[in-house]
Amino acid sequence: MSDERLIERQCASELVLAGDFLQVRRDQIAFADGAIAQREYVVHPGAVVIIPVLDDGRLVLERQYRYPLGQVLLEFPAGKIDAGESRWTAAIRELAEETGYRAREWACAGVLHNAAAYSTELIEIWFARGLSAGPQSLDDGELIDLCLMQESELDALAAAGSLTDAKTLIGLLWLQKWRRGEWALTWQPAPAEAADPSTP
Amino acid sequence: MSDERLIERQCASELVLAGDFLQVRRDQIAFADGAIAQREYVVHPGAVVIIPVLDDGRLVLERQYRYPLGQVLLEFPAGKIDAGESRWTAAIRELAEETGYRAREWACAGVLHNAAAYSTELIEIWFARGLSAGPQSLDDGELIDLCLMQESELDALAAAGSLTDAKTLIGLLWLQKWRRGEWALTWQPAPAEAADPSTP
């Protein structure tokens, strides 16, 4: 099946919100048949989520207040990619900043699109193992409680509807598939410069 | 562990974008320690995703161009909740409009939060079975190709990194858990008024 008839072509593009945190664009687009429509969407730099697996098999998770939802969510560590930063570097940095953990080995499981209708965001999914603990170094205005959990605890929360964060549910899916040998991960040693986070 | 120290309290709220499609608010917030910060987020009416299971076990999926990503995604049917509409009614309506299918039985699997950092969106996850085919009735500016797929095909795409839509990956997780008897669904007959979609 060809995608030609589905594709929307940009005719014009305007920045309609230059917020401190969110950038929103409004584009005029044309369908393959020439009809015109409008699309509004958040321009996002992309993000990473990390599934940190301790040597004893437990997972490192975070509890964080999500203001737009008015509730605390249980999530795998995650964060936005900084300008000029590779996704892997962002994963190493976010894991260290939010949890204090450094990993000896990393594996990329792919990407997910979490809000395809109205955001350019993609989240790259990383596994981390060979973890050693250290101090958190949170950004201003970032409050995070860490929790160490078994896969079975996380699974029970998801089955009961108490685990609702999309990237975390997908991390659980990947973890269980990998542990059962159904979906493959390719592990790589952490880059040398990441071994000592005090190195500039 | 108490959540008190994590909670952010609203001090002021301003609508900073009233778009045709996106509404964005900027709030001043206070942390438990009195520090002040700002949050920008999309105000979203909520959505539903439907996992439609045919009597022969195949699944009904859609291919749709996602303009913010510049690519066609493979997704379970989904859509926004209309004003005053229940989530179940939205699921019945979206399945009928986007795919033409009507379901004899429905089961709600819970909710997911897909962009907790910058959107109020929640997506309620519905299963539909006992499906009978009918005509699509798409909105203006909605172009959707339907695909009927086996669970194994969807699983192979996910393993290869070619299935990236978050709600669809979570639908696959739920489907496999339910089929293995690990996560439970409670099925309900479709409401009477939904049996004949020509009834007002």
Image (cartoon, coloured by chain):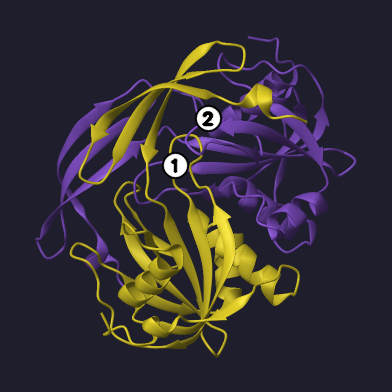
Chain colours: A yellow, B purple
Nearer to me, A91 or B82: A91
Q: Which residue is mark 2?
A: B86
Extreme residue toward the right, this view: B56
Q: Residue at x 32, y 34 (%)?
A: A24
Asked whether, in this view, residue A18 is left or right of residue A196, the answer is left
Nearer to me, A102 or A74: A102
State which quarter of the image contains the C terminus of chain A: bottom left
Badge 2 crowding class, 10 Å Cα cut-off, few under 14, some 14 to 19, many 20 or more, is few
Q: Which mark is residue B46?
A: none
Which secondary structure lies at badge 1?
loop
**Which amino acid, by three-letter code, is at mark 1?**
Thr
Chain containing mark 2: B
State which quarter of the image contains the N terminus of chain A: top right
Q: Is residue A82 above or below residue B24?
A: below
Which secondary structure lies at badge 2?
loop
Nearer to me, A156 or A41: A41
Q: Which mark is residue A120?
A: 1
Q: Residue at x 53, y 47 (%)?
A: A113
**Which amino acid, by three-letter code, is at mark 2?**
Ser
Badge 1 crowding class, 10 Å Cα cut-off, few under 14, some 14 to 19, many 20 or more, is many
Q: Residue at x 29, y 39 (%)?
A: A23
Q: Position of residue B4 (x, y in %)?
A: 24, 65
Q: In 3D space, how far apart are the residues under numbered discs 2 and 1 (Cα atoms)?
A: 29 Å
Q: Is residue B36 above or below residue B131?
A: below
Q: Position of residue B122 (x, y in %)?
A: 46, 43
Residue B58 shows in the view: yes
Asked whether, in this view, residue A5 is left or right of residue A165, the answer is right
Chain containing mark 1: A
